[in-house]
Amino acid sequence: MSKSLSMALALVMLIASATVVAAGQTRPIRIGYLQADIHQLACWVALDKGFYQDEGLKVEVAGVFKAGPEEMSAFIAGELDMGYVGEAPATTAVANGAAKVVVLAQVNTEGSAVVVAKHSPIKRVQDLAGRLSAVPGHSTVQDFLLKKALAQAAVPAGKAKVVVIKPPEMIPALRSGQIASFIAWEPYPARAQSSGVGRVLVRSGEIWPDHPCCVLVADQRFLKTRRAEALKMVRAHVRATDFIRRHPEQALAIGVKYTGMDAATVRLAMANVKYTYHISVDGEKQYVRFLAKLGYIKVKDADAFVKRFLHGELLAEVLQK
Amino acid sequence: MRWGRCIAPLALLATWQALSWLGAIPAHKLPSPLMIMAGLVELIQRGLPPGYRLDYHLLYSLYRVAWGFLLAAAVGVPLGLLMGWSRRIRGVVGPLVEMVRPVPPLAWIPLAILWFGIGVKSAAFIIFLGAFFPIVLNTTSGVLAVSPALQEVARTLGAGEGDVVRRVLLPGALPSIFVGLRIGLGIGWMTLVAAEFTGVKSGYGLGYMIMVARDIQRADQVLAGMVVIGLTGLVIDQLLRYLGRRLMPWQGGG
């Protein structure tokens, strides 16, 4: 008797679990973002102000990452549905056939800066010739920006030495004089300033106005099977971005809460970032050509790649209403 | 008989390749052996970052490992001899060694950068930490395993303490020291990838190259880098074994 009872119970549980799996819809949307990256403030605003709930969405933060490539690895592993991530790591991961994501909206443009030591003799970009500068990685948008800045300042290629250092190590390296400058995303330039170590030599917006930076991406399978939810995510993102622009003080408080940094630093960092959801198509094209030229990706037709990679349909739908 | 040894790895590679062809192993998760070979060829011909070729990555890595390992041997072997020779030194230094030993070399990276900057010194320091402890501990245990009777005989025959260490303890402990050196070199080589994550000024290094491949999601080149690290480790280990056999002909094996 007890045997058949337990068997019946097991059967019920099996059916129940199968239904849950089949329902699919009940599974929360797994999102990821970068730790303390002030570009991705919209994500924290949407989480903090309950914009996802307002859309009837269940969102689970499935990963907080130190750098974009790590977040892209999580996408490749199938651990994320959507994410706030740099356009650069997303582009290389897709172009190299590893990840299958598309861009649904811009998160920000600009928001990086070249920083030199506070009392450094370096006054102009030209002065970086013959000195050592740090970038967060090859093929990053910062690498591209520095190359662009040096070219604009007519510093011949190879004249300025470049080393890869991960951003958390950049400020100590600048402080101890091991590097003459670094280029990084906010909040690292702001932190270098507020800690009295460095000053901004040139903001990335001056090197390349409105250059693309972070984007909201979605896994293609997720987009196919749960498009309605993806649309709502984009709507929440648009609302959060508008919120930052309309209520900068409240957004600042959320930035302080999520980064653990002081208000002055967050304010400084936010001032260097353009929060926008409009996808920068030309910027992405430029970037793809740069990566292909240097041999990091193999893309013959940049225009066709960008067309597939940037998926502005949902954003257009949201903005229409 | 030697060919017999190759059967298992070759069968594994063939199965792997076949499964990749059949689509059972998705290439973006685990590239096929042929794709890894192609990645390796690309690393040799063009390099990664493009222009930074594999042979230089290997040379720079060997240079860092040589520094870290030689330093570890230069400090570890004498210290191990002293610890084996004197109970008092063992009592003082032993607990310290045991306390620092379990700390993973990776945890030292932030401090290594603060102390030694981002050049060869900090990488060598991390590798040193990986190699040092096996060398010290194996040397100590090698000395302790030398029969006390042999030492007594030497002393009775009028040998001073210096002679006892040089002529009795050192040769007696040599097989164990070599085991320590081999393990230390292996671990030092293993910590290389982590050590080069601290950033390298030259832009060269196998660990650094793997990091770049990771950043652009080229799993084939990550694996190709791992193959190079594995093969190089194997060659170095064989060299040490050979050296051991030459120095200790009485040992027979290695």
Image (cartoon, rainbow, N blue to C red):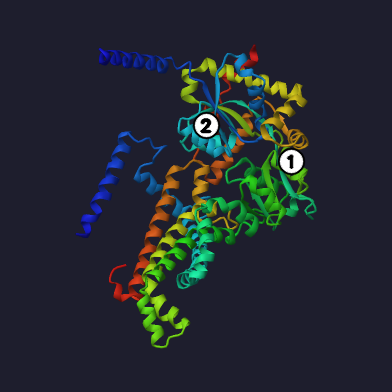
Chain of the residue where label 1 is placed in the rendered structure: A
In the drawing, what numbered circle is on residue A305?
2
Secondary structure category for the residue under label 2: helix
Q: Nearer the viewer, residue B97 or B72?
A: B97
Q: Tell which circle, 1 or 2, labels the residue nearer the N-terminal end.
A: 1
| Amino acid at circle 2 | Phe
Name which residue lies at 36% across and 79% down.
B150
Name which residue lies at 26% across and 13% down.
A4
Name which residue lies at 30% across and 72% down.
B251
Name which residue lies at 73% across and 42% down.
A191
Cα distance in 3D space between marks 1 and 2: 34 Å
Q: Is residue B206 visible?
A: no
The relative height of residue B246 versus residue B11 in the rendered view (above or below) is: below
* Quadrant in the picture for the N terminus of chain A: top left
The relative height of residue A131 versus residue A184 in the rendered view (above or below) is: below
Residue B241 placement, left or right of A283: left
- Of tags 1 and 2, the one toward the viewer is 1
Chain of the residue where label 2 is placed in the rendered structure: A
Q: Nearer the viewer, residue A231 or A284?
A: A231
Secondary structure category for the residue under label 1: helix
Residue B222 placement, left or right of B12: right
* Snapshot quadrant of residue B233: bottom left
Q: Is residue A210 visible?
A: yes
Q: Nearer the viewer, residue A210 or A111?
A: A111
Residue B247 placement, left or right of B109: left
Q: Nearer the viewer, residue B199 or A215?
A: B199
Residue B23 coordinates in the image, percent (x, y): 33, 33
In the drawing, what numbered circle is on residue A260?
none
Label 2: few (<14), some or many (≥20) within 10 Å? some
| Amino acid at circle 1 | Ala
In the drawing, what numbered circle is on residue A190?
1
